[in-house]
Amino acid sequence: MATNASEAQRSKEAAVESPAEGRLSSVTAAVRVLKAFSEEEPEIGISTLAKRLKLAKSTAHRLATTLLAEGLLEQNLENGRYRLGIELFALGALVRRRLTVSTQALPFLHELREKTDETVHLAILDGTSIIYLFNLESNQAIRVRSYIGVRKPAFCTSEGLVLLAHSAPDVVGRVIKEGLVARTLNTNTSSAALLKVLEQIRVEGFSMDDEESEAGMRGIAAPVRDLSGQVVAAISVGGPTQRLTKKALRGFTPLLINAAEGISTRLGYRRP
C-alpha cells in the first residue's frame, strides 16, 4: 500500500515535471498558483492550494517556495499561508505605465473627482468581468472604496454595463451563459432585462448602477473610445445612496460624459 501511494504521488508530480515538457508544465503550474489568489481569498495555505490545483502537496510547496524566493509570493509567518508578493505590484506598475488609456485619462479623472467630490474609476472589460485600472477616492468620510486590479462582474456594475453595451453579442452571450448571480437585493438576474438595459445605455450614452453591485452604493459610467471608435474603457462616478440620490447622480452626467469625451479625444477619437 505504501509503495502504491508513493508511486501515485510520483506519477502526479511527473505530470507537472516530466522531462519532455517539465519546464513548460512547471511554468503553467506556477501561473496557476498565482491566479489562485483573489480579493475574496488573499491568503491560501499549501494544503488548500494543492487540493484546488490538483497537485501533490510537495509539488505545490516547491512551486510556492520558488515563487517566494522570486518575490512573487510572500508568506504570513503567523499562519504559514501565502499571499501575492510585492514584486507582482512592480511588474503590474510597468504594465499600467504603458496603458495609454490610463495615462491619458489621469487629468480628466482628477478634474472629475474635484468637481464631484465622489470616487471616480477607470475600468476595462476582461472576459466577463471588469478590472479597475485606476481610482481616485472621494475626500468625504463615507465613500466608495476600491482598489486597482480588483475584478467585479460586468453585468451589475455601471462600468461593466457600459462596456457590455458596446461589446459584440458573443461577449454578452458569455456573460448570460455564466449566470447572472445576485450580489444584492437589487441585482438584475434576468437576461431579457439585461438586454433591454444595454439597449437603453446605447441610446442614452451612460449607465447607472443602483445598488446592483454593492448595497448602499450607486454609480454612473460613460464609455471611452479609441482612434477607431471602439469602446476600450469606461469611467465612472460613485458614492453612498444617502448622499447620492438618483437625481443627484444623474446631475453628474454632463461632467462624466465631458470627461469621457475628453479622454477619447486624447486617444484620437473624433465624433462622426
Image (spheres, helix red, strand yellow):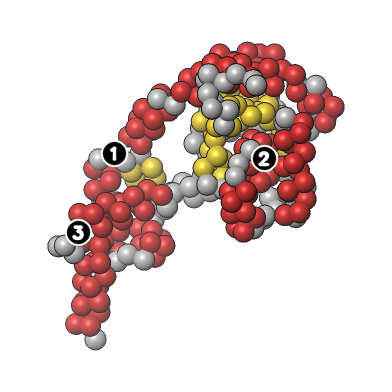
Query: What amino acid does circle 2 point to?
Result: Ala
Q: Which residue is mark 1?
A: 71
- Between residue 105 and residue 203, name the one nearer to us: 203
| Residue for point 60% across, 41% down | 167
* Residue 163 picture location, percent across and down: 62, 37
Q: Which residue is mark 2?
A: 165
Local SS, label 3: helix
Above or below, 93 against 32 in this view is above
Q: Nearer the viewer, mark 2 or mark 1?
A: 2
- Between residue 259 and residue 13, name the one nearer to us: 259
| Residue for point 73% across, 48% down | 195
**Quadrant (top left, top right, bottom left, bottom right) of the N terminus:** bottom left
Query: What amino acid does circle 1 point to?
Result: Gly
Instruction: Report which quarter residue 142 is drawn in.
Output: top right
* Residue 138 picture location, percent across and down: 65, 22
Compute the Cα span from label 2 to label 1.
39 Å
Residue 22 shows which numbered tag? Answer: 3
Compute the Cα span from label 2 to label 3.
43 Å
Q: Nearer the viewer, mark 2 or mark 3?
A: 2
Question: Quick check: can you spot residue 140?
Answer: no
Q: Is residue 40 left or right of residue 61?
A: right
Q: Residues within 10 Å of mark 3 (few under 14, many from 20)?
A: some
Above or below, 112 against 200 in this view is above
Q: Earlier in the sequence, mark 2 or mark 3?
A: 3
